[in-house]
Amino acid sequence: MSRTTLGQAQPTPENTHTPSPKADPTEQESPVARTRRRRPGNRGPAGAALRTAHVLLLPAVLIGVYWAFTAQPGAGFYTPTPAAIGTAFVELWFSDRFFVDVLPSLGRLAVGFALAALIGVGLGVLLGLDARVRATIEPVLEFLRAIPPPVLVPLMIMLAGIDDTMKITVIVFGCVWPILLNTVEGVRAVDPVLSDTARCYGITGTTRLRVLILRSASPQIMAGLRLALALAIILMVISEMFASSSGLGFAIVQFQRTFAIPEMWAGMVLLGIIGFVLSSLFELVEGRVLGWYRGLRAAHRGE
Amino acid sequence: MTTTHEHTPHHLGERSAMLKVTGLQKIYNGGATAVEAVRDLTFELAEGELVCLVGPSGCGKTTLLKCIAGLMAPTDGTVELAGQPVLSPPPGMAVVFQEYGRSLFAWMSVSDNVELPLKEKKLPKARRAELVAESLAAVGLTEFADAYPWQLSGGMQQRVAIARAVAYEPQVLLMDEPFAAVDAQTRADLEDLVRELWKRLGVTVLFVTHDIDEAVYLGERVLVLSNSPTVVQDDITVDLPAERDQLTTRQDERFTQLRAHVYAQIQQAKKGTTAPAA
């Protein structure tokens, strides 16, 4: 009966659709970013210091191991030391390039993700509420979903040119699916008793949508958004790797082609950091939106 | 079995019909086979009356209740609330469902749950606050106003649902086996709560239950339903004093007689009716 149960449960709604990206661009992330993703789940108020230690310990060890590896005499040109990468990182990203490459990338990411969320949730509610519309549209959606989004890049270059429209379209096309499909499942799973209750008390129209349907489906919607965020970052980079003149993906490919190896690594590290920060922010928002859901699940398990 | 309602607080001469069910029939059409869940139900609830509806399990109580609540269209027959036909959930009706855990909004606090229907009624804020506070006090949950429903025990959650129904100020309160899922002690408390609220508010209550004791203990009248396809098998007036008490009332000789009578009726209902549906 206390609220200390809040936050213990990880939201893992059933029916979470995981799209399968055919290419695996996670290879481009640095080891640092990867290990940082695996954080321990204890969130007690007393464990702040311990938590920080947990978060930093493994990355520190891995960087240390990598450093020892690169410090060997025979270590290659392609694996610069962390010191070299760090220097390149500061020189690169604390300069104009931040505005030329990083900000446009983040802007496309934000617009693409927001559009995907809007389309995914909007269409998902429509499909979830109406069985006939669902039956009509679902086969087409299943087909479109099966197309790996990166193959749209060549097509979009022809249709929309190489500007932001192309890149945003690729992001939206790729990351709308988990949002859409999760929203459909969430909306369909609205409890019939609760739905009847709402009807009895005259809760209809937009209030019903806002208070009952969207809130009830929010665990699934948030799970979809979480998947979509990861996809959006991947697609942002991929869309910039082709026919582009700015952006992080463009920069990394350019560094690689000009053998600016520490700079290439610095780009990957920055991507890792961006991914980490965004997912932390997402978790923060999710904690606020789904506090009730985590508590509910904990209550169901515990009592 | 006739009686005068000498103790009932709302007895002011002739009571007008608040809820009127006439010739209600419900057939579920499922392709080739049609199942007649409810055949021909006719009964009335006078204003301010507390009537319990019992019947053998599977006799279509839920179907009936959904038709009365306007959640489901009957195949034939009519439901009238204060003279107006019920075609969709009417504003003068509140429902308390059996599944308390599924009828409260888990993402809203207890007081928000109670207040939401009042917002939809477009009541001014001050009035809403007043109603929420009153109804939560009436069910003894004032101090849990800011808690989430899932932080409360089952009995307390059902109290929240009752508070929400009471705050809605309905003309008719429908209760669909509201205490079937709570433990016996909580159940006794909640029964007394329903009696108390009913007497205080003068609301008309239709209380559906499968528990014969509960029906006799709570009701002014008990309607016994037959087996499916359902008709009203018997209409029994409960001539127990209005002041009821879990101990003395249940030991009352009259209580035992009435219970035996209802029990016999239900046994008969189980055997008696022919034409089994599905």
Image (tube, rainbow, N blue to C red):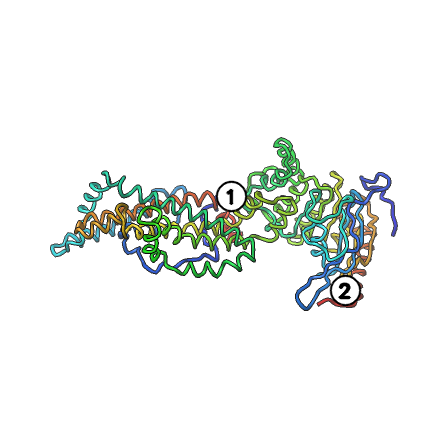
Q: Position of residue A125 (x, y in %)?
A: 52, 51
- 10 Å crowding of disc 2: few (<14), some (14-19), many (20+): some
Q: Position of residue B88 (x, y in %)?
A: 69, 48
Compared across the picture, whether A3 is left or right of B179 comes to left
Rendering quarter of residue B165: top right
Q: Nearer the viewer, residue A226 or B216?
A: A226
Residue identified by numbered label 1? A2
Identify which amino acid the numbered label 1 is placed on. Answer: Ser
Compared across the picture, whether A178 is left or right of B145 comes to left
From this viewpoint, which residue is outermost toward the front?
A: A159
Name the chain letter of the residue that bears numbered label 1: A
Residue identified by numbered label 2? B270
Q: Are marks 1 and 2 in contact (CB under 8 Å)?
A: no
Task: Measure the alpha-carbon separation of dots 1 and 2.
Answer: 47 Å
Name the chain letter of the residue that bears numbered label 2: B
Q: Secondary structure at mark 1?
A: loop
Labelled disc at residue B134: none
Q: Secondary structure at mark 2?
A: helix
What is the tally of numbered marks visible in this picture? Answer: 2
Q: Give the answer, above or below, for where B232 lies relative to B125.
A: below
